Amino acid sequence: MRVPASIKRHLICLRHALVDLSGIDDEALSQQARLRTFLKALKYIRRRDLLLHLDTVLADIRALSPVDRRRLFLYIEKAQARVKTGHLRASLRRVAPELAEKIMGHLTEPFFKKGRAKGRAEGRAEARAEALLQVLETRFGTLPVALRKRIAAADEAALAAWFGQAIRGASLESIFGASSAS
């Protein structure tokens, strides 16, 4: 279908420009450090020798905000060549030694938060298990070793259910089943 000339000027043009970055000198990519950094990341990310060019990609890291740094490192993390934390730290020490540890701290912070949350959950489970053991021993005396191990290995949901039953239950069997008395 032919489009009339009077309407053609109002149509959106969806032409795409495809640029091969590999042939462009790194410093000629852009005068803006932020854009140049991301263009260099695009240029080298699919290469197997990315580790050899990591200093080049990170050369303007000082110009990036913490959010852009995190974006850059997430992008690098998905590279074909496996870039380990040690590689990033070494490269940062070469290109921005005064920022290296601060940047690495920001990168590892989510892992520490996740670890702290996991530790807190484990601590809550241990505290709940101790409370359950205390209630059970107060009500029923010394507990069998197998039952103590079962309680120590239980998750928070099971411990919460058992705790409620331990307050009302008439015997260990009524709380844990027939196998608890051994």
Image (cartoon, rainbow, N blue to C red):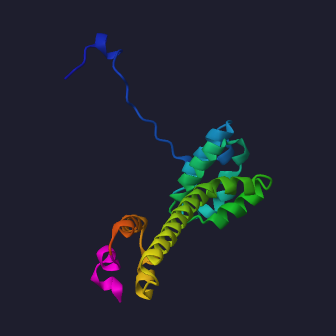
Q: Is residue 86 one of those drawn in magenta?
A: no
- Say if residue 22 shows up in the picture: no
Name the foreground residue: 1 vs 129. 129
Name the foreground residue: 109 vs 119. 119
Residue at the extreme top: 6
Residue at the extreme bottom: 182
So how many labels did they put on this image? Answer: 0
Q: Quadrant of the N terminus?
A: top left
Q: Position of residue 64 (x, y in %)?
A: 67, 42
Q: Is residue 124 left or right of residue 96?
A: left
Please say if 78 is above or below 139: above
Q: Position of residue 130 (x, y in %)?
A: 51, 72
Name the foreground residue: 65 vs 50. 65
Residue at the extreme left: 1
Q: Position of residue 117 (x, y in %)?
A: 54, 59
Please say if 68 is above or below 49: above
Name the foreground residue: 95 vs 146. 146
Residue at the extreme right: 98
Task: Please identify the dominant SS of the magenta region.
Answer: helix
Q: Position of residue 110 (x, y in %)?
A: 58, 55
Residue at the (68%, 57%) spot, across then down: 104
Q: Which residues are magenta?
A: 171-182
Residue at the (50%, 42%) spot, across then down: 19
